[in-house]
């Protein structure tokens, strides 16, 4: 019997509520007979909903709530010894064949301690570049406590990466961070997306009115207000915004200010299965995102063949972007307006961008290909463990 121990800090209940549960996400290729998910919180998710993430494997859910920041004086390592010991004892009872940590925060540190004590291979995936995505965007003046906490987190990050047998960034721009912080072996493995409901766009004929869709959390780094203002300059175009965040009310006001509230449709959230099904029914996918990586929402759009408009990131460009299959624009009203006009009036250009995106995405990021990459990593480590025992 082959078993996997997954250590996460996420709230699975939130992911279930938002419809962001992906088949076999925690058990690629259904390699494992048992999957133990260890949550460093008190979350009690719907077991039936979470079962989808492990396929036919037996699902085991465990809670090991992380002590509070205050009680541990800012998560001082010596104050976490009892908590770490409990995690090690649980792993001793489970006897997993492999450990997987999602992220290298304190949950990753726990996984690393288990690996050291139990001599079990550890795979750590990285979903952000904390140096760029968090620490570069923090100011001690705005919140000195959070600023200090994220400075302290480097210690946990480094300990996790140095003790991982392999580190899997989910896009290329995280690779350098992983190496700089001590990872011994690094392999970029993109997120496994919806294998059931993503389907190819069948026609590039424009709807009446043309339909534009934008998907993403609504906050400073993903603020689509210039897109809304651009749509206001183009008559008879409909924009659908899917997402929620601190900028949601502001964006509603922008639509009212531009007098296009009847042409802008807001959804706070749509289950991923439903979103993937409806993507091909739109004409253009347009977003603003300053993060240094390729988002899951963008890959989903490309995998359907939906023509994409995306801003040029401030700073170093995103490695995965290419103007052959993404229309890259400045994050200005004129930038989005000119790109939308080009796509709406030049049908050959719009279709070519969509078809190029589909071919590129299917070759690199199809669910079958990305899932197979994780299976390969797991099989290599399991073979190594078997031969060394």
Image: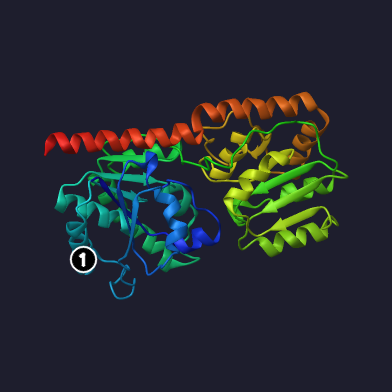
Residue at the spot 46% in from the left edge and 53% down from the top edge: 134
- Farthest residue toward the bottom? 71
> In this orientation, which residue lies closer to the viewer: 319 or 91?
91
> In this orientation, which residue lies closer to the viewer: 363 or 292?
363
Looking at the picture, the colour scheme in use is rainbow
Task: Judge whether residue 227 can be spotted in this image.
Answer: yes
Residue 351 appears left or right of 357 = right
Vertical position of residue 15 compared to residue 55: above or below: below
Question: Where does label 1 land, which residue?
Answer: 86
Task: Judge whether residue 319 can be spotted in this image.
Answer: no
Q: In terms of secondary structure, where does tag 1 sit? A: helix
Q: Residues within 10 Å of mark 1 (few under 14, many from 20)?
A: few
> In this orientation, which residue lies closer to the viewer: 373 or 345?
373
Picture quadrant of residue 179: top left
Residue 216 appears left or right of 171 = right
Residue at the spot 72% in from the left edge and 57% down from the top edge: 266
* Percent of width and height locating residue 289: 60, 46
Vertical position of residue 11 compared to residue 165: above or below: below
* Percent of width and height locating residue 77: 23, 63
* Percent of width and height locating residue 93: 18, 59
> In this orientation, which residue lies closer to the viewer: 41 or 304?
304
């Amino acid at each position: 019997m082959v078993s996997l121990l997954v250590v996460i800090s996420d709230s699975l209940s939130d992911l279930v509520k938002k419809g962001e549960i992906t088949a076999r996400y925690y058990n690629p290729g259904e390699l494992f007979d048992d999957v133990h998910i260890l949550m460093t919180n008190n979350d009690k998710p719907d077991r039936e909903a979470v079962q989808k993430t492990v396929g036919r494997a037996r699902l085991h859910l465990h809670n090991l709530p992380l002590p509070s920041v205050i009680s541990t004086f800012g998560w001082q390592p010596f104050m976490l010894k009892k908590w770490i010991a409990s995690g090690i004892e649980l792993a001793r009872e489970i006897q997993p064949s492999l450990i997987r940590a999602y992220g290298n925060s304190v949950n990753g540190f726990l996984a690393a301690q288990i690996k050291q004590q139990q001599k079990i291979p550890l795979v750590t995936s990285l979903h952000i570049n904390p140096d760029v995505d968090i620490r570069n965007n923090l100011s001690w003046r705005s919140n000195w406590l959070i600023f200090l906490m994220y400075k302290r987190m480097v210690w946990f990050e480094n300990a996790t990466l140095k003790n991982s047998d392999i580190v899997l960034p989910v896009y290329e721009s995280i690779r350098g961070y992983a190496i700089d912080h001590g990872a011994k072996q690094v392999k970029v493995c993109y997120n496994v997306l919806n294998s059931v409901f993503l389907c190819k766009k069948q026609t590039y004929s424009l709807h009446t009115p043309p339909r534009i869709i934008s998907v993403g959390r609504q906050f400073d780094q993903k603020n689509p207000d210039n897109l809304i203002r651009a749509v206001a300059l183009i008559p008879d175009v409909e924009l659908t915004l899917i997402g929620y965040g601190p900028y949601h009310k502001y964006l509603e006001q922008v639509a009212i200010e531009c007098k296009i509230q009847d042409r802008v449709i807001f959804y706070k959230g749509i289950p991923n299965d439903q979103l993937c099904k409806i993507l091909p029914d739109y004409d253009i996918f347009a977003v603003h995102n300053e993060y240094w990586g390729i988002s899951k929402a963008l890959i989903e759009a490309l995998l359907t063949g939906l023509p994409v408009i995306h801003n040029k990131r401030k700073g170093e460009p995103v490695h995965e972007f290419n103007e052959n299959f993404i229309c890259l624009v400045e994050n200005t009203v004129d930038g989005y307006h000119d790109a939308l006009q080009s796509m709406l009036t030049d049908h050959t250009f719009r279709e070519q961008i969509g078809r190029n995106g589909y071919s590129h995405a299917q070759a690199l990021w199809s669910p079958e290909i990305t899932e197979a990459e994780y299976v390969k990593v797991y099989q290599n480590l399991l073979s190594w463990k078997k031969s060394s025992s």
